Image (cartoon, rainbow, N blue to C red):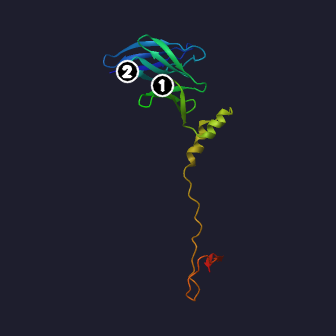
Amino acid sequence: MRLLATGGYFDASGECFIDRIDLDHGTRERLLSFTPPEPHRVPGKGFTGAAWFDDDTIFVCSFDAVWRIVPSTRRCTGRLHQVDFNALHSVAVDHATAQVHVCNTGLDSIETFDLTGRFLGRAAMTPAWFEAARQRGAAVLRNDFELVRRAGWEPAPAPAPAPVLVPPKERGQPLAIGTALSTGSGVLTA
């Protein structure tokens, strides 16, 4: 079995790589090395998740961008970036829907794009109050998620007591439609 492994170096270089690993033969081959241009070069970070787009094109995540790479030429042919990309970890190509899904762990979300790179939407994994606080510049702790997780279902409020209907007065006459009922000591009377 052969597979691709993404990675980087824990140094100041910001170099990323993709290796081809052959488990049957116990070999590893450097498929390509790539150093992202500034401002995308992040020391200690490398490539994370990757997905094949076609037979010779890979989409691969770095810290804040998705790179389109052609392994046969060892060239980067495009970059997908948004200013709020932060700690990207995975990418998936869905040819059935013509969409690319990017795991943006810095925002706890899945970003969705069409195949041209046009943004289609975001599925957030955090509550709106958390994102609003973060956008205001507050340092929101993940421990605050416990408040949301603990919310759960609450018991329904106790229903109002069921009315007790008193039969019509002794005369045996039914209540007329529209007869006003009054409550006295919790019992409905005509």
Amino acid found under the numbered disc labelled 1: Leu
Disc 2: CA contacts within 10 A as few (<14), some (14-19) or many (>=20): few
Query: Where does the image place residue 1, in percent across and percent down from the top left?
Result: 32, 21
Q: Give yes or no for contact between labels 1 and 2 (Cβ–Cβ under 8 Å).
A: no
Q: Is residue 33 visible?
A: yes
Query: Where does the image place residue 31, in percent across and percent down from the top left?
Result: 42, 13
Q: Residue 115: which disc?
A: 1
Q: Secondary structure at mark 1?
A: loop
Badge 1 or badge 2: first in the primary sequence:
2
In the figure, is residue 78 to the left or right of 184?
Answer: left
In the figure, is residue 139 to the left or right of 42?
Answer: right
Amino acid found under the numbered disc labelled 2: Leu
* Residue plotted at (53% across, 13% down): 35
* Residue plotted at (42% across, 14% down): 71
* Residue plotted at (56% across, 47% down): 150
Taking the view exactly as shown, the residue that stands out farthest to the left is: 24
Q: Secondary structure at mark 2?
A: strand
Taking the view exactly as shown, the residue that stands out farthest to the top is: 73
Q: Which residue is mark 2?
A: 3
Q: Splitting the image into 4 quarters, where does residue 160 fall?
A: bottom right
In front: 188, or 185? 188
Taking the view exactly as shown, the residue that stands out farthest to the front is: 177
Mark nearest the camera among 1 and 2 is 1
In the figure, is residue 25 to the left or right of 46?
Answer: left
Query: Where does the image place residue 177, in percent across and percent down from the top left?
Result: 59, 77
How far is disc 1 from disc 2 in space, using C-alphas? Answer: 24 Å
Q: Is residue 139 visible?
A: no
Query: Where does the image place residue 106, in percent across and percent down from the top left?
Result: 57, 29
Identify the image quadrant of the C terminus.
Answer: bottom right
Vertical relation: 145 (above or below) 71 = below
